[in-house]
Image (spheres, rainbow, N blue to C red):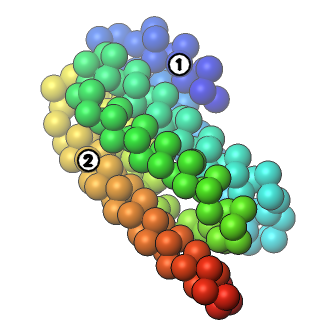
Amino acid sequence: MIPAFVAAYAAADNGHSWTAGIIFGAAGITDQVDGWLARRWHVESEFGKYADPLADRLMIDTAVVMLVVADRLPWPAVAVIVARDVFLIVGAKVVMPRGYEFSVSVLGKGATWLLYAGVALLLVTRPGTDWPLWIFWTGIGAAVAAAALYAVSARGALGRVGRGEAS
């Protein structure tokens, strides 16, 4: 859905687009429902464990970049989001081969929902509307906190494995 979103937002009127917002929101909702169903029906795959979070990150990153270009978000938003995503992707590549089982936390899932909601609301509101920014920045804070908790958890688990303890 990223190409459809990009095309819709590129044609946006004065930095907001209901079409882009609906596409973005639909991507977020279907992604969450798909993940929930996969876990509930026990049809998770190794590919899905990696691809699903990556798809979330790419959709949110694309939207944030476009909102910065449209002057709807300040550039530090891109820096924080992309830095966190690079940290998570590189971190997962480092710790997973060493036996760390990565699982999404409630805080991480909540952060994703807040980011999706904040971005979707920014997409459909007119420039100068501040309240969606509060949701977005709350999502950023939760995302950074979740990344820190993942790092602490991975470090602890790897420390136990390094000492020969079960993880």
- Vertical arrangement, residue 69 with respect to residue 161, above or below: above
Please name whichever residue, 140 or 128, is drawn nearer the observer in this view of the structure: 140
Q: Which amino acid does label 1 sit on?
A: Val
Classify residue 34 as left or right of residue 27: right
The x, y position of residue 20, in whole percent, is 48, 24
The x, y position of residue 100, in whole percent, is 65, 71
Q: In which quarter of the image is residue 144?
A: bottom left
What residue is disc 2 on?
Answer: 137
Residue visible at 46% across and 53% down?
112
- Vertical arrangement, residue 6 with respect to residue 22, above or below: above
Q: Is residue 41 visible to us here?
A: yes
Residue visible at 21% across and 22% down?
127
Q: What element carries label 1?
A: helix
Residue visible at 45% across and 8% down?
11
Q: Is mark 2 on a helix, strand or loop?
A: helix
Q: In which quarter of the image is residue 145?
A: bottom left
Q: What residue type is labelled 2?
A: Trp
Q: Quadrant of residue 13?
A: top left
Quadrant position of the C terminus in the picture: bottom right
Q: Is residue 121 visible to us here?
A: no
- Vertical arrangement, residue 113 with respect to residue 43, above or below: above
What residue is disc 1 on?
Answer: 6
Estimate how packed mark 2 is, as few (under 14), some (14 to 19) or many (20 or more) residues with alpha carbons within 10 Å: some
Residue visible at 60% across and 27% down?
2
Classify residue 89 as left or right of residue 152: right
Estimate how packed mark 1 is, as few (under 14), some (14 to 19) or many (20 or more) residues with alpha carbons within 10 Å: some
Is tag 2's residue or tag 1's residue first in the polypeptide sequence?
1
The x, y position of residue 32, in whole percent, is 60, 54
